[in-house]
Image (spheres, rainbow, N blue to C red):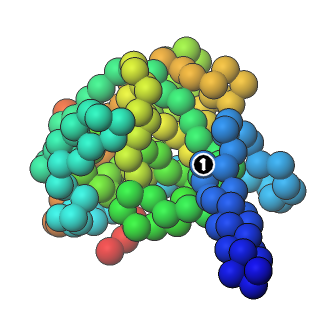
Amino acid sequence: MRYIFTALVCSILLSACADSGRYHTKYDSPPDFHYGELDLSDAVPRYEPYNPVNLRPYQVFGQYYTPMLSAKGFVQEGQASWYGQKFHGHTTSNGETYDMFAMTAAHKRLPLPSYVKVTNLDNDKTAIVRVNDRGPFHPGRVIDLSYAAAKKLDVISTGVANVKLELVHVDASGVVTVGNSQTKDRALVAAP
């Protein structure tokens, strides 16, 4: 009888643990708690070497993806979506903790970490985000924005938006390239 009771307790504990992960909620949402005033400042690009671990090919939902080894000059158009509370506090693909209030994003193939200028083509609003995660894994979507980035670009209410992505590449000597144009705008670059 004691073994049956122990097995029952273990079963209850395991099911409680399963309900506490990022997938216990079917749908994502904005925060359902008070978080204070939201800082919508752009991420400040700086030179960060790519983590070799994040350059390895990977598989999601039966599809294989090969990250780019270098993305200098990268430009892409497509749809952006956003992710929020469902993933808040969980580990991103590059090992950081996802903060839906930070200016971050997920991309399937960009090297991690990368910085991207995102332009909402529906309203011309822009944001610079730091890509530190993989996704979105939905057809036609090219980037998943954090809640803060989606708020700045006015994507929260629509859920998706047509966007243009331009990689902000900072090399080790501080030279900045936005998309396929070199710039001398040092305001985009954080001091080393």
- Circle 1: element type: loop
**Disc 1 marks which amino acid?**
Tyr
Depth check: 80 or 55 in front? 55
Quadrant placement of the C terminus: bottom left
Q: Is residue 185 visible?
A: no
Q: Residue 119 placed where, x, y %?
A: 46, 28
Q: Quadrant of the N terminus?
A: bottom right
Q: Is residue 110 above or below residue 20?
A: above
Residue 125 place in picture, x, y as percent: 56, 28
Mark 1 — residue?
A: 23
- Which image quadrant for residue 166? top left
Tell me if residue 132 comes above or below residue 155 in the rendering. Answer: below
- Where's residue 187, x and y in %? 41, 55
Name which quarter of the figure residue 158 lies in: top right
Along the viewing direction, whichever of 16 and 139 lies nearer the viewer: 16
Residue positioned 36% across, 62% down in the render: 94
Judge left or right: residue 153 versus residue 132. Answer: right
**Frontmost residue, 12 versus 31:** 12
Q: Residue at x 69, y 81 (%)?
A: 3
At 45% from the left edge and 21% from the top edge, which residue is drawn?
79
Q: Left of 6 or right of it: where is 134?
A: left
Left or right for 110, reference 153: left
Q: Nearer the viewer, residue 32 or 27?
A: 27
The quadrant holding residue 64 is top left
Q: Residue at x 57, y 36 (%)?
A: 82
**Total tally of numbered discs in the picture:** 1
Q: Residue furthest right?
A: 34
**Residue 31 visible in the displayed image:** yes
